[in-house]
Image (cartoon, rainbow, N blue to C red):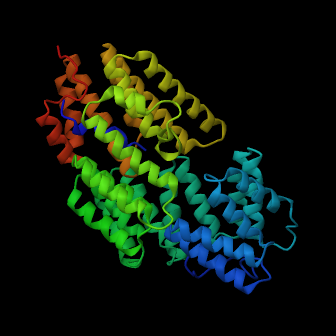
Amino acid sequence: MKKIWLLLVAAVAVIAAIGLFALPTGSEWTTDSEAALVEFETALDAMKKLYHNDVQAHLEKALELDPDFAMAKLFLADHVRFDDEDRALRLWNDVLASDASKLTPREVFFVNRTRAYQEKRFDDVEVMIDEYLAKYPDDPWVLHQKALRTWALGDLEVAEKLNLRLIEIAPNWVISYNQLGYIAMASGRFVEAEEYFTSYRFVAPDQANPHDSLGELYIILGRYDEAETSLRQSISIKPDFWNAYDHLALVRLLRQDVAGAEAIHAEAVSQPDCPDYWSRGIGCRVELTSLVLGERWREILEMLADDSPCLEGHTSANARVDAHLAACVLGEMEIALNIENKIAETLEAKESMGDKGDGEIFEAILSHLRGVRFAVEGDLEAAVEAFVRTDKQVTYMGAGNGLFKLYNRLLMVEALLATGDEGKAHKVLSKVRSVNPVIAAEFEEDGLRILGLERE
């Protein structure tokens, strides 16, 4: 078994001044401190650039200057909720309990939206957005919220129209080029995606994210040299742009260059204020891939015991997929079923919170895991059905999801060949080749096998 395929499992799968029209009158943000307002607007600028460390630093400063600054509290709560849930809750509650009579209509909208989310009135959020936009159709802040929500709900056609509208009414809202690129990429329109990301880079050449987004596209397409060049440019612009390190390490791992990936991890950790969860995420990916490449299945299960830090945060799904594969290869089906149950519990929790976007990817992961188990157990028809189901649920939205989709298709090819259906198998393989000819060629060199299934 050529080991390159197994590391793909580890890649599963996230404001400038603008001209406004038809907006609520008066000051855009409510504070008595000019200095606090400057810090807040600087935070918004960093937010649009996806400079997460800078966002928090400026929001913290804005609150120091004006402890009653409602929007600074609200935005800070949203920013820290994954790292410090208790603090986020305190900040949210402070805002919800405060007097909203002096706030602008936009600020009242954000407060009411937060209240609806806390009370799990998810359907009300969409109504709030539409009612606000009926009054202020050209407010880019809320238009952006609608675009993000339609994206999360999987309505990419509407999200695309909304982002095109944002570019029309607020040309400096350049993050819309990024969203449009990912929407095109999700739909498999890769040439169009490259055009959007290139336009994004053109209008915001001094920002790190356009180069990182292009890097992700190049990874999916197997253009690894271009990916590395683009990601390096991202880091040169913003040395603490953590996404770029993650993607750069992924490029090295796709080339089976574990030492190179370890060097990227060390480079990221050497930067000031590298978040622990991010350092852990890259470290887990590198270590797990090294074990997968060595087919050290038992060590993977030992590493990913229930108390493993790799099972926390944004690396948890990746790690569980690796552990499940190891369990199946070793014939430890009880462990494999337990992992599937954990994913099912996560899926149920996501659905109960109205988190359709994340829910769909966990549903796809669960279907994929079952497909792997079915294949190893010899139920090839059920395996093919599971892989087909996963393929329908996963898009090319980002490097992680895109590689997962391709990897799942390769397993589908192997399962189809094991059933004797060579025609369908090669049709699926041609689809992989049309996206990423590099991994298709490597798969063929390895005898069209990942799991080592017997063929009829």
Q: Is 363 placed above or below 218 here?
A: above
Q: Is residue 189 visible?
A: no
Q: Quadrant of the C terminus?
A: top left
- Tell which residue pokes out farthest to the bottom in this image: 34
Q: Is 358 drawn above or below residue 69 in the view shown?
A: above
Coordinates of residue 435 in the picture (x, y in percent): 24, 48
Residue at 47% over, 20% down: 337
Residue drawn at point x = 75 percent, y = 48 percent: 118
Residue 97 at x, y percent in the picture = 86, 59
Residue at 70% across, 85% down? 35
In the foreground, 440 or 185: 440
Q: Is residue 134 left or right of residue 220?
A: right
Image quarter where the N terminus lies is top left
Vertical comparison of 404 with 386: above or below: below
Left or right: 240, with 91 as reference point: left
Residue 170, compared with residue 375, is above or below; it is: below
In the figure, is residue 234 to the left or right of 442?
right
